[in-house]
Amino acid sequence: MQVLITHHNVQNRTLEPYEASVLELLTKFTSNGKTIIDKDMLTLIPGKINGGTFSFTCSATMPLTYYLEPLIYLAPLAPENVHVTLQTSGKLENLDLYPSLECLCSVATLLLRHLNCNNVQFRYKEPFEVIFECSPLNRIAPFDLSVEARVKKIRGTAQVRNLQPSIGKSLVIGAKRILDCVCDNVWIALASPPGKQEPMISCSLIAEGTSNCMYTASITQWLQPSMYRDPHVLAIKGLANSSLSKILDIAQRESNNIKENLEQPSLFQEAERLGSDLAKRLLDEVSLGGTYDTSLQHLPLVFMALAGDYRVCKLRLGRLNSFTIATLRLIKTHLGVACKFESVNEGGYIIHCVGTNYINAGVGTF
């Protein structure tokens, strides 16, 4: 099978660093494959999937979830256990385009265990390192994820680096103020790991429910404390520690407080706002009623296409996004599996499909 990626509609298109990095990663995970790069076309000829243990340093132009997702699809199809370590360094870019490691790993763990993977484990240091372990599958049994679910509990992690831990506490307060109104089982842990990176604040919220459903929402931002007002320090620039500066500071403190409150928020206020906005995003995902949230709803689709053909696979989706639609088109083109959509009264869709009955012949039976 050949996979062709064309760039005819993009002028002066070059291979981005993250694209070269993911191609190198897939080359390391497979053998006897071929990658042909032409002027306006990229041709991939996949090779045999390998298992085993290896590590890889990814480009910082994309978060680690971008590189981890294809391995989640390939690891259950390997001939032996997979132990992969992905790491990166520096200031990561495009963190707002992908879910956090905690969100992706939580949903992937639930899904792979539902597929009867005996050993599935993720260990991560958000957002710079992740270790992924997975046992292979001989075949994928058809599954039904169409039952409407109810949320049982909400868990989360707030993390601040090179900032006051109390800023993370403000983020937790902002999130819990919203979530406590709708759920009586909410717990958000606060972590302040050491490091030499730039100031960063992140939070991941995960709503766990019945019938193997899970909804997530995450946010990660690199902060510049100079952009926000420090409520404890009001200094007059250019006067240093002279007596005149102290007199002027006392005389103008009240007016400066009013002016700065109108112009710039403090870091604590910004963190609390981020927490409230993130909690509202999570509740929006829950209200859509899918099995998984919008950003990760496409994960089961590949396994549905490879499942056994003796029963229909079903998956409940809320709001369809463009990535899910593109994934369905790729499955139809390369695997020949067509999906049927059924609208439900509560909103959303239920996808039906019959898999190709893929058998992993490379798995040893003894």
Image (tube, helix red, strand yellow):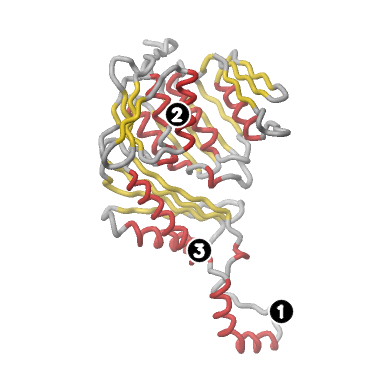
Q: Which residue is mark 3?
A: 270
Alpha carbon of mark 3 to alpha carbon of mark 2: how far? 37 Å
* Secondary structure of the residue carrying numbered label 3: helix
Q: Quadrant of residue 313?
A: top left
Which badge, 1 or 3, comes first in the chain's sequence? 1
- Rendered residue at 73%/33% (across/down): 12
Q: Which residue is mark 2?
A: 133
Would residue 366 be found to the left or right of residue 51 on screen? left
Q: Are marks 3 and 2 in contact (CB under 8 Å)?
A: no
- Amino acid type indicated by mark 1: Ala
- Rendered residue at 58%/72% (across/down): 263
- Is disc 1 surrounded by few (<14), some (14 to 19) or many (20+) residues within 10 Å? few
- Amino acid type indicated by mark 2: Glu
Asked whether 98 or 315 is in front, the reply is: 315
How far from the left and from the top, in percent, is residue 258? 55, 80
Q: Are marks 1 and 3 in contact (CB under 8 Å)?
A: no
* Secondary structure of the residue carrying numbered label 1: loop
- Is disc 2 surrounded by few (<14), some (14 to 19) or many (20+) residues within 10 Å? some
Q: Which one is closest to the eye, mark 1 or mark 3?
A: 3
- Rendered residue at 40%/14% (across/down): 358
Q: For the N terminus, which image quadrant?
A: top right
Residue 69 is tagged as none
- Is disc 3 surrounded by few (<14), some (14 to 19) or many (20+) residues within 10 Å? some
Would residue 240 be found to the left or right of residue 118 on screen? right
* Secondary structure of the residue carrying numbered label 2: strand
Which badge, 1 or 2, comes first in the chain's sequence? 2
- Amino acid type indicated by mark 3: Glu
Q: For the C terminus, which image quadrant?
A: top left
Q: Which residue is mark 1?
A: 240
